[in-house]
Image: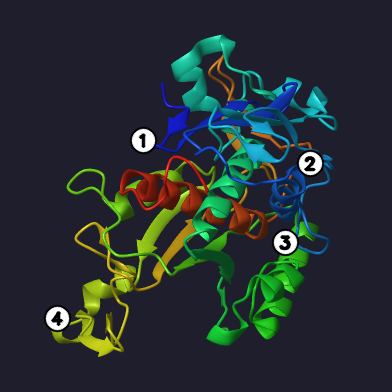
Amino acid sequence: MGNSIGSQFVVTSFGESHGKCIGVVVDGCPAGLPIGIDEIQAEVDRRKPQSGAGGTGRREEDRVEILSGILKGTSTGAPICMLAWNKDADSSAYSEVISTPRPGHADYTAFLKYGKYNDFRGGGRFSGRITAGFVMAGAIARKLLALSGIEIIAHTVQIGDIRAVPHPSDITRENVDKSPVRCADTAAAAKMIRLIKALQKEADSIGGIVEVLAFNVPGGLGEPVFDTLEGELSKAFFAIPAARGVEFGAGWGAAAMKGSQHNDLFRMSGKKIVTLTNNAGGISGGLSNGMPIVARVAFKPTASIGKSQVTVDLKTGRKVDLSVKGRHDSCIVPRAAPVVEAMTAAVLCDFALRAGIIGRIIT
């Protein structure tokens, strides 16, 4: 079974795109954490489609309900169950694709694994819709990490071939959230929006890259050799539908560097050891090294597009021309940024609990 992640801070996802609800169970949150539903709701609202960013026409209220684990605004130590009801699902467009798998989707592989029993409506369990639950869990994790001064921010650094080069001082949650594409580089953001709108008119889609930064992470988080910090982060990122690649620090660029270029040289900053550069992305030997964690997640273009594509009828084996109907994002990258933040928070929280940095009772 693969619906849970984490060892001490365990996140279990449930629900389908067009089912009754989507949600999450968080097991392992310490008792005594003050957190209100408004704080969780604020994070979930950041995931909603933004005007001008190629978002889906589906408009879900995504009002968070807490079923257990929080009493009078404080965690009890029991599992925290949270959900949002699906109220704007329209499954009529999916009756045509029961036997004709959509290119780029998990329709065919889900058929191979689950046969005729898979919930195909809106992608079912494989839909990006389920990530609303991820964000709910991330809100709990973010609040716990804030107790240790850990901050996390994700922003769009590329859509299509348009790359952002924001000034480091501009990468703030406030600036990122102002942008419909969650890009801190205003000039690049304007170009990204124009590209997305042009592709919408062509009934096509586009992918991109989200960068996530985690500040004030203490050194030593991670459990080598198999539960490395970057390994668990990568696992969490790849649970986000449409994620196709992950890199840390210099990433793939390290392959073209010399050792003398890539090595992060040490120096003293007051009483703390830091590095002159951060090509390691804040992780060395599978452990956090005290520098900011820097990771980038590449997302493929939305698979559901209006352009006619070729597929195969599973019943007859014949070629079929398929034009996907329904309401879909032309670019999921802006909505993916809060999800990347949430998954980063969940993994860091899990390791912080394993290391004893976060106690079992918040006092």
* Residue of label 1: 7
Picture coordinates of residue 40 (x, y %)? 70, 46
First along the sequence among labels 1 and 2: 1
Classify mark 2: residues with Cα within 10 Å, few (<14), some (14-19) or many (20+): some
Classify mark 4: residues with Cα within 10 Å, few (<14), some (14-19) or many (20+): few
Pointer 4 with pointer 1, Cβ within 8 A: no
Q: For residue 199, which numbered disc appears in the image?
A: 3
- The quarter of the displayed image where residue 105 is located: top right
Q: As drawn, is 264 to the left or to the right of 113?
A: left
First along the sequence among labels 4 and 1: 1
Q: Mark 4, mark 3: which one is toward the viewer? A: 4
First along the sequence among labels 4 and 3: 3
Residue 276 vertical placement versus 154 (above, below) = below
* Disc 4 from disc 3: Cα separation: 42 Å
Q: Amino acid at mark 2?
A: Arg
* Residue of label 4: 259
Pointer 2 with pointer 4, Cβ within 8 A: no
Picture coordinates of residue 316 (x, y %)? 57, 14
* Residue of label 2: 327
First along the sequence among labels 2 and 4: 4
